[in-house]
Each structure stands twice: as C-alpha cells, then as structure tokens.
Image (cartoon, rainbow, N blue to C red):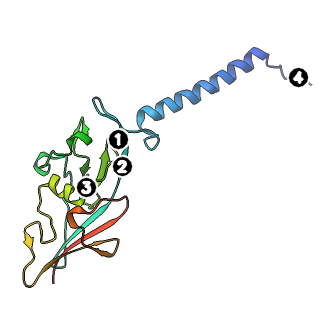
Amino acid sequence: MRRKPRVKGNANKFIIAGIIAAIAVSIAYGAVSGSFSSLTAPAAPHNEPIIMHIHPKIKIMMDGKSISMPENIGINSALYKSHALDTYGMKNPRMSPLHTHDSSGVIHVESTAMRDYTLGEFFDVWGVTFSETCVMDKCNDGMNKIRMYVDGKESFDFGQHILSDGEEIVIEYGK
C-alpha cells in the first residue's frame, strides 16, 4: 500500500498566501469595477463623493391622462435650465443633484451635501412652471384645479415640499 506524500510546512504557507492574495484581488476588482457600489460613494475626477442619494417618484396627471416624464432632466442641457444647485451636483459628468435617468418619474437626488431639496427646485432645474396654481402650461380656472398628493394624502406644500426617499408624489390637473 502506497502512502501519500506529506506536504511540508512551507508549501502550506504558500497555499494560504495564495488564497489570501486571491481574496485581496477579488475585493480590489469589486471596488474598481463598481461591484460594491452600495458600499462606496461614486466619484469621478474632480467630484466630491455623493453622500445623499434618495429616490422620490413623481407622476403628473392632466385631465385624467398621465404625462410622461422626460429622461435626463438635469443632465441634458435642453432639460437643465436652473444651475442654482450645481455646487451640490456631479461636475464630471456635469449634472444637477436633482435629475432623472429615464421616463419612469423617479427623481434621483444625488448630492455632495446633506440638505433638504424641494419639489419646486426640481421643477426649476427642469425649467417647468409649478406652483399651487399652475403646473406646466395648465393653471387653475373656474373648471379645473391643481391638486397634489404625497403617498396618497393630499398635500398643500406644492413647490415647498421636501423630497423624501421612496415617496410617491402625484400632481393632478383637472376637475
């Protein structure tokens, strides 16, 4: 019967060192590739880290019909009208701390500072009218009115409403 050769002490050390090196490389790759993006703040050259990242959702209804939210508000120059908040946004690539990526109605609040952001500031960035009397090109008249709901409850804060993570805001114009 043959006996298995014994692995000497130095060989065990090399195996352990190899395993540790493989783990270290995996962690480094994950950090560089963004696999651990929930653990690290995104940063591009000349950017401060993002320390505030929330996602409220907005839906606009005009006479019972849903209005599609444009993608890239606060990113695309045609949909980036107010630069008053630029101090708190990404510089490379340049974007407002209040922006959209798609037409889902999700507002991305990605800021280099912890501060309150309002619904009115989002509309200012977009360059669209919003108040308790007007939204877009529709204003209160004898027949129709602007109403706003936050998580199903009527709100009268309108442009002063402070955005919160996960909330659903519905703005309605109609009877």
| Residue 137 vs residue 8, the one in the foreground | 137
- In which quadrant of the rendered image does the C terminus lie? bottom left
**How many marks are shown on the rendered structure?**
4
Tell me the kind of residue under disc 3: Asp
Residue at (37% x, 43% y) in the render:
51
Tell me the kind of residue under disc 2: His
Q: Mark 4 highlights which residue? A: 3
Q: Mark 3 highlights which residue? A: 102
On residue 50, the disc is 1
Q: Is residue 58 visible?
A: yes
Tell me the kind of residue under disc 1: Ile
Instruction: Choose mark 4 or mark 1, whichever is in front.
Output: 1
- In which quadrant of the rendered image does the N terminus lie? top right
Instruction: Choose mark 3 or mark 2, whichever is in front.
Output: 2
Instruction: Choose mark 4 or mark 3, whichever is in front.
Output: 3
Mark closest to the chain's N terminus, 4 or 1: 4
Residue at (88% x, 22% y) in the render:
3
> In the rendered view, does 109 fall on the left or right side of 77?
right
